[in-house]
Image (spheres, coloured by chain):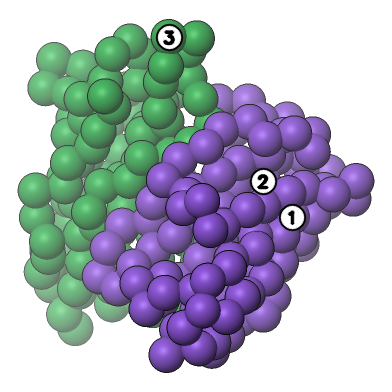
Chain colours: A green, B purple
Amino acid sequence: AQSVAQPEDQVNVAEGNPLTVKCTYSVSGNPYLFWYVQYPNRGLQFLLKYITGDNLVKGSYGFEAEFNKSQTSFHLKKPSALVSDSALYFCAVRDMNYGGATNKLIFGTGTLLAVQP
Amino acid sequence: AAGVIQSPRHLIKEKRETATLKCYPIPRHDTVYWYQQGPGQDPQFLISFYEKMQSDKGSIPDRFSAQQFSDYHSELNMSSLELGDSALYFCASSLDGSSYNEQFFGPGTRLTVL
């Protein structure tokens, strides 16, 4: 079964410092990976995705993620954190069955990012 | 840009009552997904529709049903509500149901069952 793991419940970082939110995946076949952000009482906002191609994916709000096949990781990064980046971040993988990728997303448990001023 | 619209935003029901949640996808999006997010949990896939046909099914209770209409909006019908059904229900939409296309989420409907 497809799955993603977010090993950190919370990440704390000072404003202006680089941030990393970790995600590892377990899939059969090629993974389709996504990052979403959720602000309090809001829906999930799409940040970026990896389908194929360059391992470094650039997304919204200055975020990027690096796909690493050997380490089965897809960590989210940003060079300089902002207080407004404080939110809940979800890594997700597209589910697969014998016919190929299905539509549904399987989410990690989420990582709360807290950026201190 | 137009986003996914969900109504109502908040809903309070008693046990054993019924509820209907509505979702209006982004214009031209033909695929709709429903997810349930319990307190402090990650979203769990319930069901999806592509071109008005059910395309995938997840952990959706038999008490729940859903459909997609000719204008691509979708409704999630929930009957015999239980306390455990209290959650945030998200609808998402995407274009042509392709695995490559990201899903755009609505703001959610917060259902509270008393």
Q: Secondary structure at mark 1?
A: strand
Residue A100: image location, x then y, percent: 48, 12
Amino acid at circle 3: Tyr
Instruction: Residue at 13% x, 15% y: name it.
Output: A70
Which corner quadrant of the image does residue B28 belong to?
Answer: top right
Which residue lies at the image location 75% right of the left edge and 34% below the top edge? B53
Q: Residues within 10 Å of mark 3 (few under 14, many from 20)?
A: few
**Marks 3 and 2 on same chain:** no
Q: Which mark is residue B32?
A: 2
Question: Disc 1: which chain?
Answer: B
Query: Residue A10 vs residue B48: left or right?
Result: left
| Quadrant of res A59 | top left
- In the image shown, does B60 or B36 lie closer to the viewer? B60
Q: Residue furthest right?
A: B70
Q: Are marks 2 and 1 in contact (CB under 8 Å)?
A: yes
Q: Distance of mark 1 from mark 3, alpha carbons?
A: 28 Å
Residue A48: percent from left, percent from top: 44, 42
Give the residue pinned by disc 3.
Answer: A98
How packed is label 1: few (under 14 Cα within 10 Å), some, or many (20 or more)? Answer: many
Which three-letter amino acid code belongs to the residue tagged 2?
Val
Q: Which residue is mark 1?
A: B74
Q: Which residue lies at the image location 79% right of the left edge and 55% below the top edge?
A: B73
Which of discs 2 and 1 lies nearer the camera? The answer is 1
Quadrant location of the N terminus of chain A in the rendered image: top left
Q: Residue at x 90, y 46 (%)?
A: B70
Above or below residue A85? Residue B64 is above
